[in-house]
Amino acid sequence: MDQQELKKAVGRAALQYVKSGEILGVGTGSTVNCFIDALKESGISIPACVSSSVRSTKKLEQYGFKVLDLNEVERIGVYVDGADEIDPHFAMIKGGGGALTREKIVAMVSDRFVCIADQSKKVDVLGKFPLPIEVIPMAVRAVSRELEKLGGKPVLRDFTTDNGNKILDVHGLKIEDPVQWEQKLNQIVGVVTVGLFAARGADVLLLGTDEGVQTLKP
Ligand code: 5RP
């Protein structure tokens, strides 16, 4: 099965976690786009969503879903989002689409993080995918120097986030202890968000494989 078919399959599989009547957290990316399409087709009635990006908000609103600002919501039952890499403990690298900060915030207030991913995303050790870090624009060079001291090779992405910040994609890291790395990188002044979701990883992984969608727990 090609990658797009696997994304569609996990998008459909995530519908089982959507409860009608409950506010839903919706992430960002091509896999999540498949989930939003499946949600529309399913006809499941949800009162509203909270989205992690302007892109997802636009798509949801085009389909007629109500999208709330997170400040209007106290709690989200389920958050569905993709990942760039996910390890056996369900720590993830996220932010390939540049939405990492809002994704981390929505994940924080969600009871359950359902990760949807095709088989290419499952890895033993995080770091082959360059780690996205959102940075305050004036701190790009200063943060880059700090990252180099830690052995990373930061590359400035030609992109501005929904929050008006920049992204450094850090190559060359072998992230064997993602919780420690997340803490360490969070402490660099000028960093807004690290695209490592380790302290709060996924709770369920719906993995699209050639043999079908597997439901995995950490
Ligand atoms: C966006 C993300 C995405 O979840 C991640 O990049 C995966 O995207 P895709 O489903 O397109 O492979 O973190 O910031």
Image (cartoon, rainbow, N blue to C red):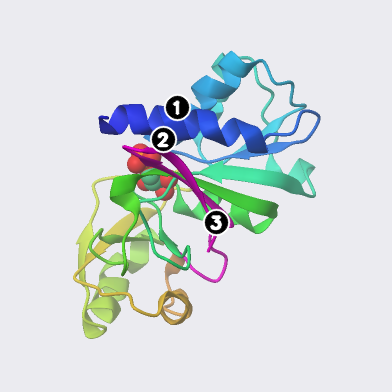
Helix, strand or loop at disc 1? helix
Provide the residue span drawn in magenta. 196-218
| Left or right: residue 140 compared with residue 198 | left
The residue at 55%/15% (across/down) is 62
Please give the residue where the numbered disc 3 appears in the rendered image: 104
- Mark 3: few, some, or many residues within 10 Å (few <14, many ≥20)? many
Please give the residue where the numbered disc 1 appears in the rendered image: 34
For marks 3 and 2, give the one nearer the viewer: 2
The residue at 74%/33% (across/down) is 19
Q: Kindly check if marks 3 and 1 are in contact, taking CB atoms under 8 A apart as contact.
A: no
Please give the residue where the numbered disc 2 appears in the rendered image: 31
Give me the C-alpha separation between circle 1 and circle 2. Answer: 5 Å
Label 2 beta carbon less than 8 Å to ligand 1: yes
Q: Which mark is residue 46?
A: none
N-term-proximal mark, 3 vs 2: 2
Q: Amino acid at mark 2?
A: Thr
Helix, strand or loop at disc 2? helix
Q: Position of residue 7 (x, y in %)?
A: 38, 33
Q: Residue furthest bottom?
A: 149
Q: Amino acid at mark 3?
A: Lys
Q: Position of residue 74 (x, y in %)?
A: 80, 49
Q: Kindly check if marks 1 and 2 are in contact, taking CB atoms under 8 A apart as contact.
A: yes
Q: Amino acid at mark 1?
A: Cys
Tell which of 191 and 25 is nearer to you: 25
Helix, strand or loop at disc 3? helix
